[in-house]
Image: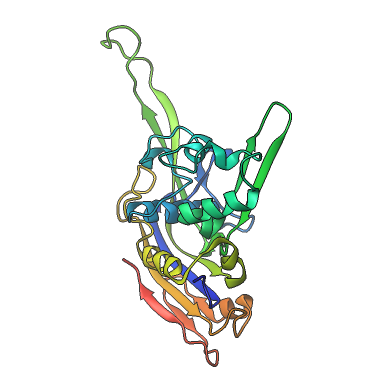
Amino acid sequence: MSLQNKIDFALIFSVKNANPNGDPLNGNRPRTDYDGFGEVSDVCIKRKIRDRLQESGESIFVQSDEKKTDGMPSLKTRAESDEYGLGKDAFNVKKTTPEETARLASEKWIDVRSFGQLFAFKTDAKDGVSIPIRGPVSIQSAFSIEPVSITSTQITKSVSGEGDGTKKSSDTMGMKHRVDKAVYVAFGGMTPQLAERTGFSEEDADTIKKVLPKLFEGDASSARPEGSMAVEKVIWWQHNSKLGQYSSAKVHRTLSVNADGSYTLDDLEGLAPEEIDGF
């Protein structure tokens, strides 16, 4: 059975001496808005959710290059694979319908039935087909509670030159950036009306709920050393109907987060939030 109750959630996480989401168009500096508040894009958060779901054994369509488990070189190859995907016939308009392909893709991959996906493949030299799937799970970008302080450090990198490797080329200069210390908040929601279309179930919602507290586990890198990013709290509001007792905007406004990570929650009659500790 698909999701029957509207869900809102909030994610509170801390950053210390790490680059939570570098901007490739700005020298990979941590993302900020025009007022200096730190930002982590919704795409970045979804990537981490996919990775944690994949590590827990779920089937994921949009896999990162570093965490591929099936060896497929592209999304198209994975989708058309007989072993790991739906097979080529699923994307042949002469053998199936877009609606059937969307249904099969949603059944196959949890990230497709959660976040949606656009499948676009050529059918012959002239014609093509686009299969849009709109997912029920939406996530906003995360923003810091206060403007962030960014430290930039100049680094050098030595690499071996050509030949037998005994000679080294000249050092390459570069920059490494980090947010010194900050607390971020992101909001999200799950819509039953869209869940009906993809088959997103109560069990799927619970699966995502379980991975959110450990969003940054297994995500360490040079830019994000182990322990430099941590989920402090997940706030989970489950409404008593498909439409929900309150709008998401009103629910989100009940949460006030301080710069040290502490927070307060205003009461909404009939809607008690569940407060979940980070992993």
Q: Residue extending furthest top?
A: 163
Residue 187 in sight from this viewpoint: yes
x then y, percent, for residue 217? 32, 56
x then y, percent, for residue 191? 58, 70
x then y, percent, for residue 170? 38, 17
Q: Give the quarter of the image for residue 161.
A: top left
Residue 38 in sight from this viewpoint: no
Considering only vertical position in the picture, is 215 above or below 270? Answer: above
- Horizontally, residue 69 falls left or right of residue 152, namely left
Foreground: 150 or 74? 74
Q: Residue extending furthest bottom?
A: 269
Q: Residue extending furthest right?
A: 126
- Write the residue at 38% across / 54% down: 58
Foreground: 142 or 78? 78
Q: Quadrant of the image for the C terminus?
A: bottom left
- Write the residue at 50% across / 58% down: 148
Which color mode does the image show? rainbow
- Horizontally, residue 44 falls left or right of residue 36, namely left
Foreground: 263 or 273? 273
x then y, percent, for residue 87? 50, 39
Considering only vertical position in the picture, is 196 above or below 80? Answer: below
Considering only vertical position in the picture, is 262 above or below 132? Answer: below
- Write the residue at 37% across / 42% down: 67
Callout count: 0
